[in-house]
Image (spheres, rainbow, N blue to C red):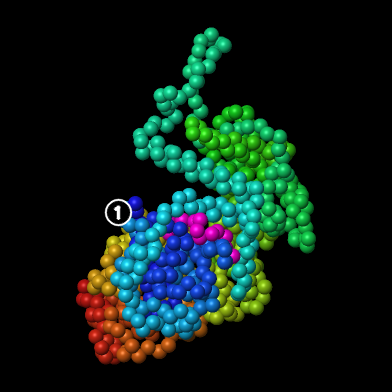
Amino acid sequence: MAGFQVKVVLEGTKPPLWRRILLPDHLSFADLHDILQIVFGWEEEHLHDFSFQNSRARISNTDYADADMDEREVAADAYLRKGWIRYTYDFGDSWEHKITLEKEMDDYDKRYPVVLTHRRNNMEEDSGGVWDGAESSEPYDEAAVNIHLKETCFCEPLANGESPELEEERELLQLLWNKFSKGQKKQPPKKKSDLERKLEKINSFYEAADRKRASDNAAGQPKDIQRPGEGQLVFNFDTGKTDVEKAPPDYCIYKCDRDITQEQLLEENSEQQMADYAKYLLIPASPGRSKNEAKKAILTVLEAHPEYYLILMDEITVKTYLLSTEKKAGEVLGVVPEKSMVTLCAWGLWDVQIFKSRENNRMEVAVAKGNESFVQFLRTARLHQFFSTKQLITDGIFYLLQSYGFIGLGALHAKYQKAFGPISYEDLMRYLYLDGRFYGEYITGECLIDNSATSFAAVNGLDPERVLAQMSEFGQELEYADFKNRQLLKWKEGIGSFVPEWDELADTLVNLDVVYPEELSGFLPDLYLDTISGLELDELLYIIENTFIEGPEEPRNMLALAMIWINVAACWLNTPLACLKGYSRVGLFRRTGREAFSIAAEEEEYIVPEELEGDEQIYELPWKMQQELYYLLSDRSSKKGRKLAAEGVRKLAQSVGKEMQIFEVLEALLTLE
C-alpha cells in the first residue's frame, strides 16, 4: 500500500487557509470530493468539479453536472503526479481549492485519509466566497475531523482509472476550439468517434508494452531471447528436417495488407473533428458544411499541398511512413514512436488492428491506398531543408509565446515578422495549429481583447480565463511589448537567460536544498508559467513553501523562505506578464511611474499592525511593507548596504509596534551575510 501527502489551499484567502492531508493511493475523485467536504467543513449543498493544471478536462459527478469524465470512474493518482488539481465547490460562491502533491509515501498503510496540520478555521457555507465570506468562529477540531474521516471515508482502491495521458490522447483527437469568454463553459462531446476509440486502444497497447518491458528488465530477462517452451515445430522443405521456429516477440508491430483508403479512414472522425481539421488547414468556413463536404475539402487541400503533411510530421514519422510503404505484409515494422502512430492514424494514412492473447500481443498496420503521389513527393522532396525551415519557424513561435504567454493571433504575426522576418499570416497559422496546437503545445481560442473579438494563442498550462480577467483590469489599451530578435533568441539557453533573476532563484533553491538540481528542469518552468499567468507573489511563495518537509513556521524554514522571497520577488517584478501584454511590472513602472509592487496585484484592505499576529511569513505581510523590505534588502552586496538594510528593518519593526518573528529572522539574515 502507498499514499500521498498533499497540501490543499483555499485560493484567495489571506493569510492562506490550508490543510495538509495524507491520502491513500488509487482513490477515486468521488472519494476525494467526500474527503474535501469533511476536511473543509462544507455541507454538500452545491455542485462541484475538478480541473487541472495540464489538462482541459473537467471531472465531476455526471449525474448532476456536465463534465468530461465521471468522478466515480477516474483515479486521482496520475493527476496528482502531473500537476496541481483545482477542486471548485459552489459555482456561486466559487470556493476554489488548490491541491498540490508534496510527496509520495510508500509506507502509508491506511485506506482512509488523515489531516496532519492545518491553518485557520473553516469558512461559512453560503457566505459569499473568498472576498465576502466569513470565517467560522468555531475552532478547527483536527482530532474530531480525523475521527470522522476514519469512520466515513474508507477508500476502496479504484483499478483501471483513466490517466491524464489517455485523456490527452482523447483531447488530441477532439481538437475542441474552446471559447474563453466570461461565463461560457466547454461542452464536451457526448459520444466518442471511431478514431477516438482506436487511439484509446493504441494508448493501451503502448502502456501494456511499457509495463511488459519494465517487468522483463526488472526480472533480468534478456531481450529477444526465446524462453523455454516457446516456438513450434515446422518442417523445412529445403533441408528435409524439422526446425523449431521461434515465436514472434510480444507487443510487435507488423505490416499487413488491407484494402482501405484515406477517405474511408477519415470517415472515422467525428463531425466536429473534421470541422477542426478544416480550420487547422485554414479552409474557409462554410455555414452548414457537412462532415463529408469537410472531408473532401481537406483531401483536396492536402492533395494540392502535400507539404502541409510535413508540418504535422517530424523526420522520424516521415521515415516510419516511408518504411511502411516499402515493407511487405507480415514483415515487422520495428519501433514506432507513439506520437508517429497517432499522427499517421489521425490523418488517415494508417489503419491499425490490435490482437491480444495471453501468449502474444501484436499490432497490425495497414497503409491507406491511393497515396502514391504523396509517397513520391516524400521521396523527392528536400526534406532536410524543409525541416530546417520548420525548426526555425516553430522555434520563433515558441520564443514569442513563452515571452508573451498569451497573445492575439494578429499581434503574434506582426511580432513574428518584426523579430524573425517575413512570413504570410496563413503559413504562420498553419505552423501554429498543425504543429503546436495539434500536439497540445499551445492553446487557441477566441475571446474579447480591448472590446474586440480576437483569436488568441497561449502556452499550454496557462489559465486563459484568469489572464483575460486580469488583462481587462490591468492591461486594457496597452500595446503589446516589443521583443528584439536577440532577446527572443535567449530562450535557446532557457528561462534564466531570458530573465536573469530566474538563474539567481535557481541557485538559491539548490543551495538551500529546497529543490535538487535535477528537479529544476521541471520545477522552474512550472513556476515561470504560474508567474506569467499573473499569480500573486504570496501564491508563488506558497508553491515553494509546499516543497518544505518541516512546517514553514520552523525558524530555519522562515529564514530560508525569507532568502527565497527576495529572489522570487525579483522574478515576480521582472518577468513579462500575459495580462500586461509582455510588459513586466518593472517595465510598466518605468513607463508609468506606478509602484511596481502594486501593478497587476489585487488591491488589499489596509491592515493595521494590531491585525498582524506576529508569526506571519514575509509574503503574508501587506504589500507596501513587502515593497519596503524588498528595496531595503536588494542592496546587500556591501557591508554598508547590509548595515543600512538592518537599520531599515529595525525601524520598520518599531513602526509595527509589536514583536514580529520575521523581523528577527531578517536581522539574522543580514548578520549571516
Picture quadrant where residue 494 is located? bottom left
Toward the front, the furthest residue is 151
Expressed as whole percent of the image width and height from the top left, the position of residue 369 reads 71, 37
Expressed as whole percent of the image width and height from the top left, the position of residue 77 reads 43, 56
78 part of magenta stretch? yes
Residues 524 and 262: in front is: 262
Amino acid residing under circle 1:
Asp
- When the figure is inspected, residue 664 is found, relative to residue 56, above or below; the finding is below
Query: In the rendered image, which quarter contains the C terminus?
Result: bottom left
How many numbered circles are shown? Answer: 1
Expressed as whole percent of the image width and height from the top left, the position of residue 186 reads 61, 65
Judged left or right of residue 76, residue 475 is: right
Expressed as whole percent of the image width and height from the top left, the position of residue 422 reads 65, 60
650 part of magenta stretch? no
In this view of the protein, can residue 301 be seen by the observer?
no
Toward the top, the furthest residue is 240
- When the figure is inspected, residue 291 is found, relative to residue 228, above or below; the finding is below
Residue pictured at 60% horizontal, 80% vertical = 477
Binning the other alpha carbons within 10 Å of mark 1 as few (below 14), some (14 to 19) or many (20 upward) gives few
Residue pictured at 65% horizontal, 51% vertical = 193
Question: Disc 1 marks which residue?
Answer: 107
Residue pictured at 61% horizontal, 69% vertical = 185
Residue pictured at 34% horizontal, 54% vertical = 2
* Helix, strand or loop under label 1: loop
Judged left or right of residue 489, residue 1 is: left
The stretch in magenta equals 66-81
In this view of the protein, can residue 337 be seen by the observer?
yes
